[in-house]
Amino acid sequence: MLKRIYLHLFLLLLPGLSMAQLQLSFPMPRLVVQRGADGSGRLYVAGQLSAIADRIEAQLTPVAAGQGTATAWQTVQTNPAKGLFLGQLTGVGGWYVLTVRAVRSGLTIGQATVGPVGIGEVFIAAGQSNSRGLGIGDNDLGSVTGRVTTIDTINHYYPPGAQALYSSGDPSPVPHFVSLVAKKRVFPMGESSWGWGELGDYLVNRLNVPVVFYNAGWDSSTIENWINTANGIPACNRYFCAANWPNLQPYTNLKNVLRYYGATGGARAVLWHQGESEYGDASSGTIPQYATQLRELIQKSRADFGGRNLPWVVARVSFDGQTTRQAVIDKQLEVIQTPGLTVFQGPLNDTIQNRHGGAVDVHFQNSQRPVVHPQYYLNPNTIPDDMGLSRFARNWNASLDNAFFQNATPILPEQFIATDNPTGAAQPGQTIRVSFAQSGTFAAGNTWQLQLLDTAGRYKAILATGGGSPVTAVWPDSLASGQFRVRVVATNPVVAGVPSGVFRVGPAADLSLSMAISRRAIGINDTTTITLKLTNSGPGPATGITVQNRLPGNLSVVATNGLVLQNGLLTGQVAQLNSGASALFSMQVRPTVGGMFQNAAQLTTSDFYDPDSQTNSGTGDGQDDTAIIDFRTTDGSTTVYTSPNPDQTPLPAVQSNQPAPDPAKADLSLQVSVNNRTPAVGEIITYAVVISNRGGASASAVSVTAALPASVTLVPGDDFVPGSGGVVGTTASVPAGGQAIFHFRVQALASGRAVITAEITQATPADPDSTPNNGITNGEDDTATTDIRVK
């Protein structure tokens, strides 16, 4: 007896692939990656493919005329397997729509687009409150070009009772980019667009490429705060040190932005605006150590960024609302002028007087937010004195001049990871396996961390670590229901992978598909109706279900109910199917030529995992979410037409459940065949009974008993004689590796179906996997059954 072992995918994912053969997971809309010194950039492409293809191709098309240069189709990956794909394409700086397609035999079998996406400039702001912004009545103007982007969220809050500002130390979330218009935040700390949105418009207008900003500024922070937390020493607000800032802030935010966004998108520079909180003079307070500590901070940030030599731009700032300290400016200049440090001179923002909407203050503010955006980036005239933030942006633009872009060597992404959808049962105590694809070289000692995320991509926990793909984890007992994602993160250097799709954890839905037909023998161009029945045996509900039926050749559809026909593919969808419920689909079909038709259907999506089947795994694996029915035409044609099955998950090799031959035992099995399965009444037919011995010892005194139904009678004269329980055949021995063959004849007495069963009822020595004379319904290999239909 043989059995096939199937690998079941218990975890089904959202969003499902539906009718699409290709789904993109990276890049996401409004992502901007850093261009290189030559003006071109590398854009990684990752996603899921539901069919085997010859190659994945991609191209870039400018969003609007003059906003980039269209590319030809570029090969992203050749011979991608069904499932995860990963590759890259290159283009010059610009604002694009990305189109990705899967090609097989010269035909596009799946296509997806995402846009806009950019190859441009990436900046990370850091420093203190004049880097971060306040967001409360600052009248930020934001960007109006549409080509300046950010992540519109923050990771901090102000606890009640004047406690220390809290900012998460968790790994950064999966980014969701938006246009950096007025009032938008800048992850992780910016509570408004501040002056960065306007600065972005200056750069877009000058460089004709998109820009993205991140913001790791921190209120009232001194250089000592920054270097201490970079070295693992907690710090606090110098003006109100009731408690240390948790999570080694402010440095942790900068480190995480570099690792989680700079690693995958690259960066041009850190824009450092800090110095207003320093105190003392050239020989006292924090000022004497300022240059030393800032240099150390810059080098520490680069070490934590995988050793990448990311440029810094240091603003010259010291005005605290009352006093300007030249000693601080001198220290900043000392850092800027350090040979080989790759630090560039930023704006001298101490010169911006009446910066707070026309009033004197440490902080910048615009006095108003005009109904019509003034677009100062297009107007070289003087900005009004009371528009402090707009003047801040213009000063920064002047510092980021052509010489800066010619000499500040940008950091481009060198490693990339894409996380596949998990397999296994995501239920408490059960094991899941997460595969991933990688590009680039990772350092010795690198490990792969599996992080659990919520549906929005926010970090929840570390599930496991591993040395390679796949990473295996046990699902936590505390997470019995909900929707989640996972991502694989490298540790050396730290690079966050593109996350998996969203998946649900909850009560299992047990879906099955069956098929019935109104007539199985019809004439050419005649019609028959095929009905598909979808059933949920529970215990939980199922949602997001898709049924697909690929038509065999030369079979046309006359009418459908609940199914949509497109290019030979019938698709039906069910939004929700409760436990115990069923849904019906039907199609009336017509064969246009003679032949035998084998029609197959399967479930391709479902939001909940199924304990005994895997969606979209093909129609040839025998799972209960597939159904097959056959019919024929009456003209006698034997040509076979079968539903295509391009998405079949590779099946494991057939495995035998037979034990290894034992030299001390016999291993008997039984087969029965008949020479005519459709005899007429009164006709005599012959049965052959074959006893095989796969064991290492000879079997002796072997008897076989066949039970005959009342509709047939034994014809004497062959190897079987009447006995207890039916007719009996015996042999003295069956040698090791040999066979014994018996025959008996019966005469059909009445029409109808007749079943004959046979069993080895006696044998010596013992058999390792069957017991003689213990019944015919236990599945042992010493039993056999065959039937006839008497006409």
Image: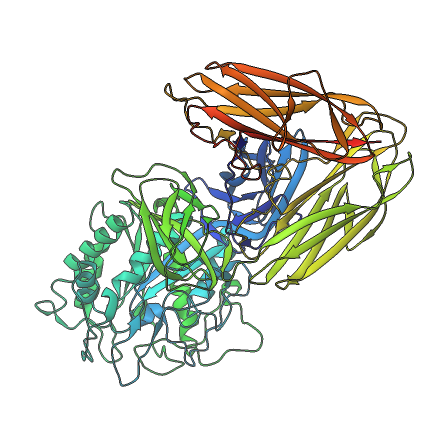
Q: Residue furthest front?
A: 723
- Colour scheme shown: rainbow
Q: Considering the image in quadrants, where does the C terminus appear?
A: top right
Q: Is residue 728 left or right of residue 341?
A: right
Q: Is residue 266 visible?
A: no
**What percent of the width, then of the height, locates residue 717?**
70, 16
**What percent of the width, then of the height, locates residue 91?**
52, 41
Q: Is residue 187 left or right of residue 167?
A: right
Foreground residue among 285 and 436:
436
How many numbered marks does the figure carry?
Answer: 0
**What percent of the width, then of the height, locates residue 428?**
40, 59
Q: Residue furthest bottom?
A: 161
Q: Is residue 195 above or below residue 634?
A: below
Foreground residue among 500 and 411:
500
Q: Is residue 768 above or below residue 39?
A: above
Q: Residue furthest left?
A: 283
**What percent of the width, then of the height, locates residue 568?**
77, 41
Name the residue at 19% across, 73% down. Answer: 244
Q: Is residue 22 left or right of residue 199?
A: right
Q: Quadrant of residue 132?
A: bottom left
Foreground residue among 376 and 77:
77
Q: Is residue 737 left or right of residue 535?
A: left
Q: Is residue 241 above or below residue 223?
A: below
Q: Is residue 581 visible?
A: yes
